[in-house]
Amino acid sequence: MAEPFRIKVVEPIRLISREERQRKIREAGYNVFGLVSDDVYIDLLTDSGTSAMSDNQWAGIILGDESYAGCRGFSHLEGAVRDVLGFNYVVPAHQGRAAERLLFQVVVKKGDVIPFNMPFDTTDACIRSLGGRPVNCVADIAYEPQAIDPFKGNIDLVKLRALITEVGAQRIPFIMLTITNNAGGGQPVAMSNLKAVKEVASEYNIPVFIDAARCAENAYFIQQREGGYQNKALAEIIREQFSYSDGCAFSCKKDPMANIGGLIGLNDEELYQKILPLLIAQEGFITYGGLAGRDLEAVARGLYEMTDDDLMANRIRQVEYLGERLDKAGIQIIKPVGGHAVFVDAAAFLPHIPQDYFPADTLAVELYVESGVRGVGLGALAFSIPDEETGEIIPPKMELLRLAIPRRVYTDRHMDVVAEGLKRVYERRNQVRGLRIMHAPPVLRHFLARLEPV
Ligand code: PM9
């Protein structure tokens, strides 16, 4: 089936010359975050806030009610969150990390431990800034890029139980599952795993929260891969996922295809009431939370749109299409291909570059120079963390180049260009040199670092 939409508005893009690209990336400190978007031909830096909104979402923008209190958009958002996610209380926020922070400030205390499958980098940084410690409990197979498994985002229940026994349930304010698991390659979590985690959590009276940014993509994988779900609609599966949780933090810039927006969904009124004063102090009044009324409309409409079975099938197919092209060229990628992105195994691509010289970020730079395509390195530059006791820097287990595909934005021809560019870098991979840091902040350094070729 071709795209279940047609294109009504277009945005011109251009490819600058190779010499210009070399100059631009040098000026950007060999960090793709420093590039100006006009100098990027195909932008796969992120699928967050970069999707094409539908005519219905744009109509919502025009209809947005900008009243400070009690705007219509908030009622629509409440309705959508109740219908699509199944939560009674909604805390609007300007984006996902603001939603997380509001929730975490209320529930995380210094010394707390939070079991995750894998937290995303900003989520990890937020918990640490509040004195908590996220712990990866993802199944080991998540660290084997070539191993085929339908649900590589699952929590390992043995690891989870061992952690609860080791630190004690009183130090665990909640368990969190990121669906799909972005940091681990956009890999899904099975419904059976969500259910089992909830059962373990209930034994110890620990709440479960979901990082829901890509919950509809996760539901699609459940529909395609998990027994008993083939004949269920995406909408039904999405709701069932949340039924095994006590709430969610949601970046609505991903699956709901809004350019901005986030929320917390809850059924616990007491917790909701505790968050409200922080919401007013930090984001805005409780019915707009740092967003314009028009944005609330786009989010509310996007929440319904993400449940469209045909749209989701088409979106995942495009990501798979790019993955298959790279795989055929002998380029190692995380398999199976994730929901929102193709993750290239940069350590396997550039085996001669040690992790200290950032193979993932090097590959992102090379791909930009080769073809004007912007991906992002997710490796030692992004995810190294100091050991709690020794202070020694511990690098992550994987070096990945992420090619995140915005929804409804690029055609398969664009994907062909991406694949061809990466193939050309692959052909000359032995000549590629790594990068070293010239300047970087102590945390979240991949966003701001300036580098130079070794
Ligand atoms: N994710 C991404 O590109 C955008 C920021 S980094 C370039 O993948 C999860 C699973 C995310 C995420 C953001 C956030 C934060 C929370 N959870 O970006 O603040 O992938 O709306 O959401 C990015 P916001």
Image: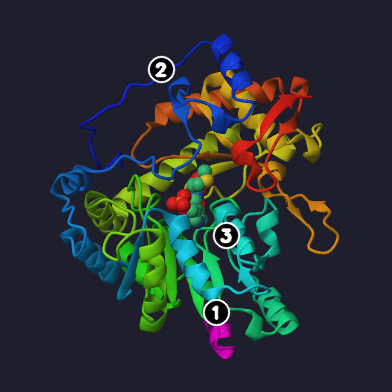
- Left or right of 211? Residue 94 is left
Q: Which residues are magenta?
A: 196-206
Relative depth, front residue between 114 and 441: 441
From the image, give the main secondary structure of the stretch colored magenta: helix
Q: Nearer the viewer, mark 1 or mark 2?
A: 2
Report which residue position mark 1 lands on.
196
Name the residue carrying label 3.
Answer: 126
Q: Secondary structure at mark 3?
A: helix
Give the residue type that dot 1 points to.
Ala
Q: CA distance from mark 3 to mark 2?
A: 37 Å
Is 24 situated above or below 338? above
Q: Is residue 117 magenta?
A: no
Q: Mark 3: which amino acid?
A: Cys
Q: Which mark is residue 14?
A: 2
Q: Is residue 440 found left or right of 249 in the rendered image?
A: right
Q: Where, quadrant-wise, is the C terminus in this rendering?
A: top right
Quadrant where the N terminus lies?
top left
Q: Residue furthest left?
A: 63
